[in-house]
Image (spheres, rainbow, N blue to C red):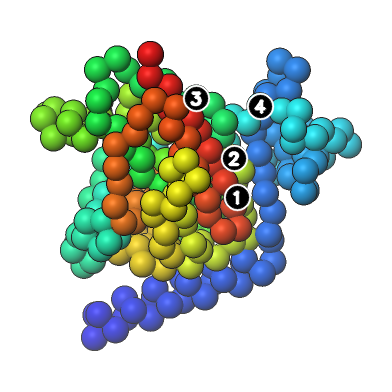
């Protein structure tokens, strides 16, 4: 009976998210233009500049800027960056009925679309991990699975770069997962998207390395948000990397990694190793 109730609740959450997806499809961006950090709503190749942070329902200023003229930034100023491990059976599977396996990345690891990933000198085994990333809408503490959709503002693309050698021998994954530049994210935050079933594709120098639908995530977004909120106060703009599918491989100097998610767009960064 309890399992049936949980299934019905999950279906309800999925349905409610799909309904919202039909009502509010928008793309938002945080960027730098002529030395100023701004927020905007993206329409095609044009950004409609907002009066403030899009998370605060800022209004349009009337100013419009070409996307080609701006430098993309991480779409939010996250105070906390969480990540789910072992969330696709094609990569590493965890127990679907248990707690989601979690770890932390640092806000200082975040970089934007087109920014170079400058690896530490002794990083010899860095792998890509293309992922869907949740963006928290408002303060969340001890929310239920049924309430969780109201706390997800939207989604973006991310790359959870991981130094496998450090990951295997360090006490914690801090260095392996949260070094500077190890969290590319962006370029936009998509709202009104049914992120429960979108195709994620990771390419290395143009070649497809990972490709799978988010419908195969073991721990669903609502469950993860609810679980985290039992222990941490989630704040607007906080990010949750939702895990990577398939296989990964080591990166080399000048490699270009792109993470494309249907309905969001493409996050692309270049590896630089001095």
Q: Residue at x 18, y 63 (%)?
A: 95
Taking 108 as reference, is 6 left or right?
Answer: left
- The CA span between labels 2 and 3 is 14 Å
Closer to the chain start, of discs 3 and 1, is 3
Q: Looking at the image, can residue 263 be seen?
A: yes
Front one among 181 and 108: 181
Closer to the chain start, of discs 3 and 4, is 4
Front one among 75 and 244: 244
Q: What residue did someone put label 1 on?
A: 265
Above/below status of 83 relative to 35: below
The C terminus sits in image quarter: top left
Closer to the chain start, of discs 4 and 2, is 4
- Circle 2 crowding by C-alpha within 10 Å: few under 14, some 14–19, many from 20: many
- Circle 1 crowding by C-alpha within 10 Å: few under 14, some 14–19, many from 20: some
Proximity of marks 1 and 2: CB atoms separated by less than 8 Å: yes
Q: What residue did someone put label 2 on?
A: 187
The N terminus sits in image quarter: bottom left
Q: What residue did someone put label 3 on?
A: 116
Secondary structure beneath disc 2? strand
Q: What residue did someone put label 4 on?
A: 71
- Circle 4 crowding by C-alpha within 10 Å: few under 14, some 14–19, many from 20: some
Q: Residue at x 20, y 59 (%)?
A: 94
Taking 120 as reference, is 184 left or right?
Answer: right
């Amino acid at each position: 009976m309890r399992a049936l109730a949980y299934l019905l609740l999950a279906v309800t959450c999925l349905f409610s998210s799909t309904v919202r997806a039909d009502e509010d499809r928008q793309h938002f961006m945080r960027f730098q233009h002529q030395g100023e950090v701004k927020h905007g709503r993206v329409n095609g190749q044009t950004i409609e500049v907002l009066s403030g942070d899009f998370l605060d329902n800022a209004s349009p200023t009337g100013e419009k800027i070409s996307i080609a003229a701006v430098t993309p930034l991480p779409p939010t100023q996250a105070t906390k960056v969480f990540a789910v491990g072992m969330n696709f059976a094609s990569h590493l599977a965890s127990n679907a009925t248990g707690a989601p396996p979690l770890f932390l990345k640092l806000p200082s690891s975040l970089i934007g679309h087109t920014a170079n990933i400058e690896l530490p000198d002794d990083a010899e085994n860095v792998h890509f991990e293309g992922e869907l990333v949740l963006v928290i809408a408002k303060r969340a503490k001890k929310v239920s699975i049924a309430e969780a959709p109201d706390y997800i503002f939207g989604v973006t693309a991310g790359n959870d770069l991981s130094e496998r050698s450090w990951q295997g021998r360090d006490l914690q994954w801090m260095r392996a997962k949260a070094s500077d530049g190890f969290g590319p994210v962006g370029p936009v935050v998509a709202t009104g998207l049914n992120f429960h079933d979108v195709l994620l594709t990771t390419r290395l120098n143009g070649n497809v390395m990972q490709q799978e639908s988010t419908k195969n995530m073991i721990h669903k977004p609502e469950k993860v948000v609810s679980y985290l909120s039992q222990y941490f106060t989630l704040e607007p703009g906080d990010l949750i990397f939702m895990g990577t599918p398939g296989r990964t491989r080591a990166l080399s100097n000048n490699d270009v990694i792109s993470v494309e998610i249907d309905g969001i767009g493409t996050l692309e960064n270049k590896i630089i190793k001095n």
